[in-house]
Amino acid sequence: MPLDFKSEQKKYRHVREAYQLKEKLIKSLLKKEGLDVSNFKLFLRAFKAEQKLEVWASQKSPESFILIKTYDFCQSSGILGPKRQQGDLQTPEGIYHIDRFNPTSSFHLSMGINYPNRADKKLGKSNPGGDIFIHGNCVTVGCIPITDDKIKELYILCVEAKNGGQSKITTHFYPYKMTDINHKSYIDKYPENKSLWNELKPIYQSFEKNKFVPYVKIDENGSYKL
């Protein structure tokens, strides 16, 4: 009988150590919020201006997400605005999902997102780059580092969600918390990003209102559409 995802991950030393140090804390966190460790979903939101990574969780059904943790970025690079090419030091902005787990990362533990997605490929340069991760340590050239200590917690949460059947952990990368006031202020400062940010704002607002992760399409022009 093949091993489940968690068992496969625990073959690796850093994952085993994470479970030894953080499993009780994670189970207690989920229980406190009324969530079953074997039957929950995750949703992540990153905010570049605030340098915050939010972790939301929900029962699989009915699906209504609650904020369970917020992690600070340990370091950041680039400026507000999307990533468009290899080596620009930018952190992406857009709608993504975690598509790989790296238990032997040079940055302790890491989870990759599916950058470049269809929008990035359409609107980016000839070499948009790749290998964008949420990881440990405290260095970055476009990724989101949250320290070795905190990545242990987030990695366990993501492993447990995937092990329970969540194939894609949706992850939204925003330039800032897209309130009306923030939106006007930042567009005034960075008018070149107005088109993208106007696409992302209703996605942000939809989740704020409903606490349900909206379905987002990418059209033939590389635009995000609810």
Image (cartoon, rainbow, N blue to C red):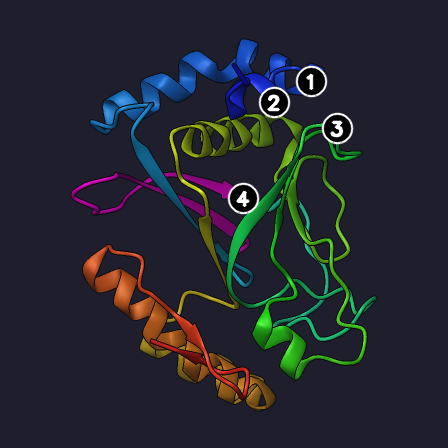
Precedes in sequence: disc 1 or disc 3: 1
Q: Secondary structure at mark 1?
A: loop
- Are the two marked residues, 1 and 3, in contact with CB atoms closer than 8 angstroms? yes
Quadrant of the rendering where the C terminus is positioned: bottom left
- The correct choice, above or below, for 103 with respect to 83 in the image is above
Residue type, mark 3 in image: Thr
Measure the C-alpha gap from mark 1 to mark 3. Answer: 7 Å
Label 3, on which residue? 104
Q: Are marks 2 and 1 in contact (CB under 8 Å)?
A: yes
The answer to whether mark 3 and mark 2 are in CB contact below 8 A is no
Residue 81 shows in the view: no
State which quadrant residue 86 falls in: bottom right
Q: Residue 142's spot in the image, x, y percent?
A: 71, 58
Looking at the picture, does residue 119 appear above or below residue 153? below
Q: CA distance from mark 4 to mark 1?
A: 26 Å
Proximity of marks 4 and 3: CB atoms separated by less than 8 Å: no
Q: Which mark is residue 72?
A: 4
* Residue on which disc 2 sits: 9
Which stretch appears magenta? 51-72
- The numbered mark at residue 12 is 1
Q: Amino acid at mark 1?
A: Tyr
